[in-house]
Amino acid sequence: MLTEGYDWFRSSSKLDSRLKKELLTTYGELRGIPCIFQQKWLRLATRFKKYPVIITCRDGLAEEDWTEVEKIITQCGCKRGKRFPGLGMATMVVNINAMQKLIDCRQVVRITYDREIKALLHVAAPTVKADFLWEQKYTGKGIRVAVLDTGVYPHPDLIKPNNRLVGFVDLVKNKSQPYDDNGHGTHVAGCIAGNGQQSQGKYKGPAYGADIIGIKVLNKFGDGSLSTVISGINWCINSKEKIHAICMSLGSPAESPAQYDPVCQAVRKAWQKGIVVCVAAGNDGPQERTIASPGIEPAVITVGATDDRRTSDRQDDLVASFSSRGPTIDGIVKPDVVSPGTGIIALLSPGSFLAKTLKEQKIGEWYLPMSGTSMATPIVVGLVAQLLEQHPNWSPDQVKEELLAKAEDMGVSAFHQGQGYVRIDK
């Protein structure tokens, strides 16, 4: 295999499209280098130019096979990262030499660029009829929901009168105490399980009795990496305490089919392990084919947003203009359902990035209105928690079937609304 040519990576089915673009950029730098120096530059580039990647290996990989993969990394002077044996993945920082050898390694199925992933930010509970189950005393009590986001601040609506922020994992700064320096994750947690403590019950989520585990995978500015998000999902799968649902109001442009997307593979595994996963569709509408990853994963519940026009009457609702539309990169119908996602009032994290940048929109000391499929998704997660309290033995598939069966058709394309407006009172 000649390093000088482009064919080794252009023709490889093991490299994702983003990684190929990065390699093309590297090789494109040759154009500005005199011919007599190009060979030397290539030798240096193949050794010292590094790429953060996620290596996906075949299912059921034995320990000795992992050793073979890691041996390649070590021999090429590259850095081994974190392994996720249950997912068949590992994070690594590799050079071109290592990449060429990994392509030829029979154990390696896919090499994905560890690209950026972002928080998807762009009157709700009564609109989806959460109060129907409130009347039957279902508030999500005993259900543990993991919020993979920017963290969760210990807001009074989550910790009073009883502390329901029962866990916190920081995969960004490794702090032990819960915090949210961005504010997005706290707002999301409130959309799920805020109890309205500071608003006399006015601003509360569908599952105001549920427990929250904050898993910080995004930084102060709402940015993160695929590998950090996968770490968060892996934590949920292996948690000693049962995690019933995962809320992921985050995403990145879908660049590979779900079959090869590492975050899709991770949420699929969580689903198979009995965890209901709800994912934001994305905020790149109204164009079609804009569903973000991991919302393209067929198994999970992908949520689009509606504009409820600040009323609880569904008759005047529209699919929000920003809500991403299907079909997915694989051609399947997504989102699965839609839910209120405009001007949603929920919890504020004091001193956070969003508290400072949106300070003029604050409602009192403790609340903030925000819009996006980021807000629509946790409302659906709240409904999921209510259903799981009511039907504790239901599988993720049964929960999804119930939500889709009761969704109300809005009279628009399935690529815009999925099965329709989520509701649980039918």
Image (cartoon, rainbow, N blue to C red):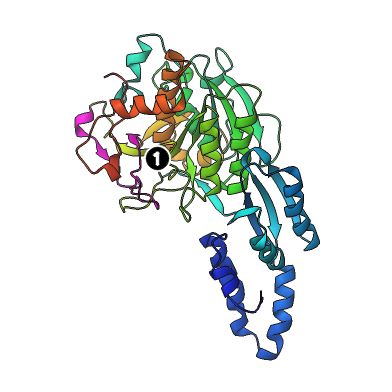
Residue at image point 47% right, 56% down: 255
Is 337 covered by the magenta stretch?
Answer: yes
Question: Magenta stretch?
Answer: 314-340
Residue 420 picture location, percent across and down: 28, 34
Amino acid of disc 1: Thr
Disc 1 packing (10 Å; few <14; some 14–19; many ≥20) = many
Is 383 covered by the magenta stretch?
Answer: no
Judged by its main secondary structure, the magenta piece is loop
Residue situated in front as seen by the camera: 13 or 235 = 13
User: What element does badge 1 sit on?
Assistant: helix
Residue 83 picture location, percent across and down: 70, 44
Would residue 411 be found to the left or right of residue 43 on screen?
left
Give the vertical position of 377 relative to 127 (above or below). Answer: below
* Residue 365 visible to the viewer: no
Residue 81 picture location, percent across and down: 72, 49
Residue at image point 55% right, 36% down: 269
Give the vertical position of 327 relative to 307 (above or below). Answer: below
Q: Which residue is mark 1?
A: 373
